[in-house]
């Protein structure tokens, strides 16, 4: 049967079929167009960079870095030629004998392969799919011929070396050099050059990380390539025995998005989409995206979480950290989780958790704007019952502590719930919500204007709280958080440039008094234990939700604001017991992580001072009445505090009664 097929093919080609085939090829030549080779070769992964220009990672289906032919070692060029097309510089783009060999192979029932010159390989790799069909092969031949008419041999070879797939997700000789030998292409030895030239024929067949059989095949082809270089006159025969087979780097199982940096890349891509850059542009556009992230600060964030995470923590414990430069909105560090590949939900920008007492500063701001001073005196006994639109609302302090008559300043330092709830009622819960919105808590975070709003009944993202505290640090100037600073095209032209604009939402006098109050939390309050050793002025607030379902520390220095949250997947599960602590509050692990991060991020930065307080409302103590409150002689059995319905992306959904620090 194969012999009959060959005879029929010969008759067809020798007769009228030859004319038809010639006409068909001519038609294909004039109808098949090719994309610009420059457009394809320059289409490479989008590079995400730190603010200093160093690379964070890449967005793109092909991991490729283009290098000019002159920077590719001569040994590598010759090794590739020896392996794939030794007479490339003298051969035509299409090999007639190779095509005939492939045709007869196909007629005999073999696969559509063989007969490919380097030009043909480049045409197939760069402009066509891997489909095995006669039509695809004809297009390959047409494009190869057209390429030869348009480009020099050096240009074709350079494009080929920057395009060909080497396995392990790497395209081109530069990324292949890094994948297999962890060095740039211009640093390769002769042996390493021979290995890369051997592997490119079929990475799955020769990459030794897959099997022992692959390793054996690679060693054999390695010798074939070296002997081919000798045959071509590019290498002396006595050199071959001296060339050692190099050590090949183990194949990394995890992808380019593994680890914490995957969350950064995904977040940047989302922001780029919002700016109008399509996924297609990001995949093949060769863009350079400069972010606001600072390399030192980002490393400090990862180190802080790694070192201060509770020992033997359960798998469903999540930690989010985000830092913002006050007044500009620049996100300079973000920790969204320990491995994006394992969990794609970003714990700094997408997960939510009950805010707890991190919302108390909004009540202070509302009070200061109404002239209520930090020296005002309040009754801090516990527990108490308040009127919530005709319903009883029971509130107790952490540990049911009894404070008696103390100032708002001291109540802030020690996060006294039975003072903050009446404070919120007096200034108006709607005013507390308004202040939170102006500070930076977005409308996507549901807040209900009830007495519980000051105790953090809402469930924001970490970035939301960090943004609000950045407004405090900027002395009342709000700036929308962002990560993308600049986008350059493949030709280095500027496609986007961020233009951050701050908006003054609070007066400096109000901010000075707020900061003074929040400094007491760090100096002699709920945050003192976790923030000791920082070595510079800081202001902040702890936050712990009901049943210790979440724990926060949010704070700032004059140069930097950051928020840290700990929570679990299931909001009904308490943090208590984690890390050996009976009670995990915002002043424990969250404050320690925040402090470790700040020390690393601000290392070498000048120590700056906060503005002095302006003493809004005067310095004399004023006894304040507690509106709508009654002392409670027995502990309440339940609280009717309105709950907040979480979205589907919730990682820590709210519980009804936030009352902790």
Image (cartoon, grey):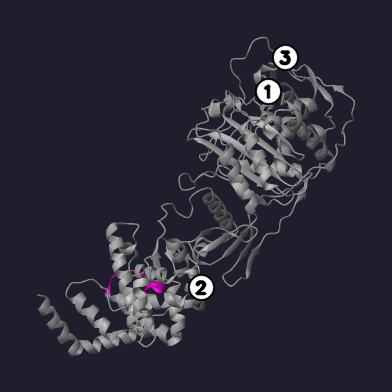
Q: Which residues are magenta?
A: 124-133
Give the structural element (helix, strand or loop) at label 3: strand
- Give above or below for 601 relative to 49: above
Q: Which residue is mark 2?
A: 67
Q: Is residue 444 visible?
A: no
State the separation of the CA atoms marked 1 and 3: 15 Å
Give the residue drawn at x 53%, y 48%. 260
Give the residue drawn at x 80%, y 28%. 409
Give the residue drawn at x 27%, y 73%. 113
Give the residue drawn at x 49%, y 35%. 316
Q: Which residue is mark 3?
A: 630
Name the chief secondary structure element in magenta.
loop
**Mark closer to the chain start, 1 or 2:** 2
In which image quadrant can residue 591 be found?
top right
User: In the figure, is residue 530 to the left or right of 515?
Assistant: left
Crowd rating for badge 2 (residues with CA inside 10 Å; few <14, some 14–19, many 20+)? some
Query: Residue 389 bears which disc, if any?
Result: 1
130 within the magenta span = yes
User: In the figure, is residue 643 to the left or right of 227?
Assistant: right
In which image quadrant can residue 391 be found?
top right
**Mark closer to the chain start, 2 or 3:** 2
**Location of the C terminus (image quadrant):** top right
User: In the figure, is residue 458 to the left or right of 128?
Assistant: right
Q: Position of residue 117 (x, y in %)?
A: 34, 80
- Give above or below for 542 relative to 84: above
Give the structural element (helix, strand or loop) at label 2: loop
**Location of the N terminus (image quadrant):** bottom left
Q: Position of residue 460 (x, y in %)?
A: 61, 38
- Give above or below for 85 relative to 503: below
Query: Residue 609 bears which disc, if any?
Result: none
Crowd rating for badge 3 (residues with CA inside 10 Å; few <14, some 14–19, many 20+)? some
């Amino acid at each position: 049967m194969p012999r009959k097929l060959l005879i029929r093919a010969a008759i067809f080609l020798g007769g009228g079929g030859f004319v038809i085939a010639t006409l068909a090829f001519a038609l294909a030549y004039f109808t098949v167009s090719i994309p610009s080779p420059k457009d394809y070769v320059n289409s490479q992964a989008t590079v995400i960079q730190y603010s200093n220009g160093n690379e964070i990672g890449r967005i793109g289906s092909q991991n490729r870095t283009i290098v000019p032919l002159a920077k590719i070692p001569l040994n590598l060029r010759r090794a590739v030629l020896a392996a794939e097309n030794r007479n490339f510089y003298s051969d035509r783009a299409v090999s007639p004998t190779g095509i005939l060999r492939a045709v007869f192979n196909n007629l005999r029932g073999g696969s559509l392969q063989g007969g490919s010159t380097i030009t043909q390989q480049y045409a197939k790799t760069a402009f066509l799919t891997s489909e095995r069909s006669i039509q695809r092969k004809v297009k390959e031949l047409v494009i190869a011929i057209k390429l030869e008419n348009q480009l020099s041999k050096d240009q074709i070879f350079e494009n080929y070396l920057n395009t060909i797939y080497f396995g392990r997700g790497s395209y081109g000789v530069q990324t292949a050099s890094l994948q297999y030998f962890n060095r740039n292409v211009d640093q390769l030895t002769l042996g390493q050059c021979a290995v890369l030239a051997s592997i490119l024929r079929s990475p799955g067949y020769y990459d030794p990380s897959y099997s022992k059989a692959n390793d054996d095949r690679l060693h054999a082809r390695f010798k074939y390539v070296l002997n081919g270089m000798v045959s071509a006159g590019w290498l002396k025969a006595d050199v071959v025995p001296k060339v050692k087979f190099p050590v090949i780097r183990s194949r990394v199982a995890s992808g380019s998005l593994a680890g914490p940096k995957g969350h950064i890349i995904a977040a940047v891509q989302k922001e780029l989409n919002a700016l109008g850059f399509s996924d297609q542009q990001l995949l093949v556009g060769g863009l350079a995206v400069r972010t606001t992230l600072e390399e030192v600060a980002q490393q400090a964030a990862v180190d802080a979480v790694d070192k201060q995470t509770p020992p033997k923590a359960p798998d469903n414990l999540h930690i989010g950290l985000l830092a913002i430069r006050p007044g500009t909105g620049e996100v300079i560090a973000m920790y969204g989780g320990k491995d994006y590949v394992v969990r794609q939900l970003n714990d700094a920008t997408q997960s939510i958790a009950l805010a707890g007492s991190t919302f108390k500063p909004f009540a202070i701001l509302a009070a200061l704007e109404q002239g209520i001073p930090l020296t005002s005196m309040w009754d801090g006994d516990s527990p108490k019952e308040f009127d919530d639109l005709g319903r009883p609302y029971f509130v107790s302090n952490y540990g049911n502590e009894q404070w008696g008559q103390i100032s708002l300043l001291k109540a802030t330092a020690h996060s006294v719930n039975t003072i903050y709830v009446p404070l919120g009622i007096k200034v108006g819960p709607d005013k507390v919500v308004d202040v939170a919105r102006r500070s930076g808590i977005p409308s996507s975070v549901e807040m209900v204007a009830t007495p519980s709003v000051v105790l953090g009944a809402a469930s924001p993202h970490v970035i939301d709280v960090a943004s609000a505290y950045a407004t405090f640090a900027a002395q009342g100037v709000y700036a929308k958080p962002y990560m993308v600073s600049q986008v350059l095209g493949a030709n280095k032209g500027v496609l986007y440039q961020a233009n951050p604009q701050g908006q003054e939402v609070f007066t400096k006098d109000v901010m000075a008094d707020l900061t003074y109050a929040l400094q007491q939390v760090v100096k002699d309050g709920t945050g003192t234990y976790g923030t000791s050793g920082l070595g510079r002025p800081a202001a902040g607030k702890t936050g712990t939700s009901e049943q210790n379902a979440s724990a926060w520390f949010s704070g700032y220095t004059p140069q930097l604001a950051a928020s840290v949250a700990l929570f679990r997947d299931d909001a009904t599960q308490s943090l208590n017991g984690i890390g050996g602590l009976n009670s995990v509050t915002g002043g424990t692990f969250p404050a320690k992580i925040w402090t470790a991060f700040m020390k690393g991020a601000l290392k070498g930065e000048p120590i700056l001072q906060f503005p002095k307080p302006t003493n809004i409302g005067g310095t004399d103590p004023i006894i304040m009445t507690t509106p709508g409150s009654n002392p409670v002689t027995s502990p309440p059995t339940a609280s009717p505090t309105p709950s907040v319905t979480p979205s589907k992306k919730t990682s820590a959904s709210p519980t009804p009664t936030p009352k902790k620090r």
